[in-house]
Amino acid sequence: MSRQVRVAVIGAGIGAAHVEAYCANAALYQVAVVCDLDATRATKAAVSAGATVETSYDAVLHRDDIDLIDICLPPSLHAAAIKLALRAGRHVLCEKPLVGSLREVEQIRQLAAGAGRAVIPVYQYRYGNGLARLRRLIAAGVTGKPLVASIETHWNRLPTYYEVQWRGQKATELGGAIISHAIHAHDLLTFTLGPVRRVFARLATRVNPIETEDCASIALEMSSGALVTSSVTLGSAEELSRFRFCFADLTAESPGTPPYRPAEGEWCFIPRGSRQQADIDAALRGFVPRQEGFAGLVEALHAALIGATEWPLVLQDAYQSLELISAIYYSASTGTAVELPLPPDHPVRDGWTAWLA
Ligand SMILES: NC(=O)c1ccc[n+]([C@@H]2O[C@H](COP(=O)([O-])OP(=O)(O)OC[C@H]3O[C@@H](n4cnc5c(N)ncnc54)[C@H](O)[C@@H]3O)[C@@H](O)[C@H]2O)c1
């Protein structure tokens, strides 16, 4: 693959932010085409990148000048679009939620292996310098063991948000606040503290008159033994995404705002005493901030595309994220605690939408 990777962005909603991220890495990427059924929307996203505009995904698949297809379509369209891109021999970057079931992740894993192409799920919240500092402290052994953590995904969605037809519907959004909004916070949780062992969830629709959940209260036990509570609402007057991790030797707290960039900004690391403060200072010495959010993700992805590094995100990341989501929906539906990993014959593996309230 040539050094400047050629990308097709499919879907020009959040796709427009992806285009900006490629433009921020203009030496690494050329956005060749933006595709949307809505030509005006595609044109608006394409213009700053100097990309051409398409209204047919099929036409994009027939082009021979594309290295990477970046899928930013509504959730229920992801699986089919990924499969078509792989069959066309392209690498794929795909927005969350990757697909609608763990079985589909497995199918895509097989297809990608057969095609010799990568499918990279988008978890751009992982790219933030505040969280990167915490991960450095954990890796340096400065934090001690994790004891408890709390997560607040307190966002606000007005009725106008649901005027976009696919939102708020089980069949097209594939869920509500768990699959569309708190997915990032829960991914950051496992990215930071490792796998979940057991989950108990209560979900409710309390903010807008929609089919899907917009409030949640979740209790999680991590494999490490740490206990975590996650509170989710789409009806918060003040929007924030806040993490508080209590480790044996320090407490780490995210700034909370801006709400859609929780891994960024000035995280607060509170030591138990002066010895721990010295350890924190030593571990963070020489920390080099990187690009954050989508721009950070696509920068890391480029290095892998040209074969210089491992893939920054892999299908297993999507699998773990969707496995937790499956367990949350199953727990809320059955009123039971769910153990992870899910066994091969667990009924929710075929898709969690059957278990939505
Ligand atoms: N990672 C994040 O932070 C983040 C943020 C927002 C949305 N998302 C995800 O991105 C995806 C898209 O969400 P959105 O908010 O941009 O939705 P959106 O409805 O604003 O945009 C989707 C676009 O896809 C277009 N489209 C639909 N079918 C098409 C087709 N067959 N061919 C070409 N274009 C087609 C629509 O015209 C629309 O413009 C969803 O999966 C969502 O969950 C992720």
Image (spheres, helix red, strand yellow):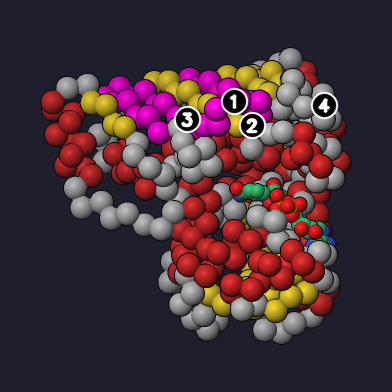
Looking at the image, is 79 positioned above or below residue 8?
above
Q: Report, in whole angstroms, how far the alpha carbon at label 2 lies from the one at label 4.
A: 14 Å
For disc 1, the neighbor class at 10 Å (few under 14, some 14 to 19, many from 20) is few
Q: Report, in whole angstroms, how far the alpha carbon at label 1 lies from the one at label 2.
A: 7 Å
Q: Earlier in the sequence, mark 2 or mark 4?
A: 2
Task: Name the residue: 82% across, 77% down.
Answer: 59
Percent across and percent down for residue 346 are 76, 32
Q: Earlier in the sequence, mark 3 or mark 1?
A: 1
Q: Report, in whole angstroms, how far the alpha carbon at label 2 lies from the one at label 3.
A: 15 Å
* Disc 3 secondary structure class: strand
Percent across and percent down for residue 166 are 82, 45
Quick one: quadrant of the N terminus?
A: bottom right
Q: Is residue 89 left or right of residue 315?
A: right
Q: Nearer the viewer, mark 1 or mark 4?
A: 1
Amino acid type of disc 3?
Arg
Q: Which residues are magenta?
A: 227-255
Decide: marks 1, 2 in contact (CB < 8 A)? yes
Front residue of this view, candidates 29 and 97: 29
Magenta segment main secondary structure: strand
Looking at the image, is 214 positioned above or below residue 77?
above
Quick one: quadrant of the C terminus?
A: top right
Label 1: which residue? Answer: 237
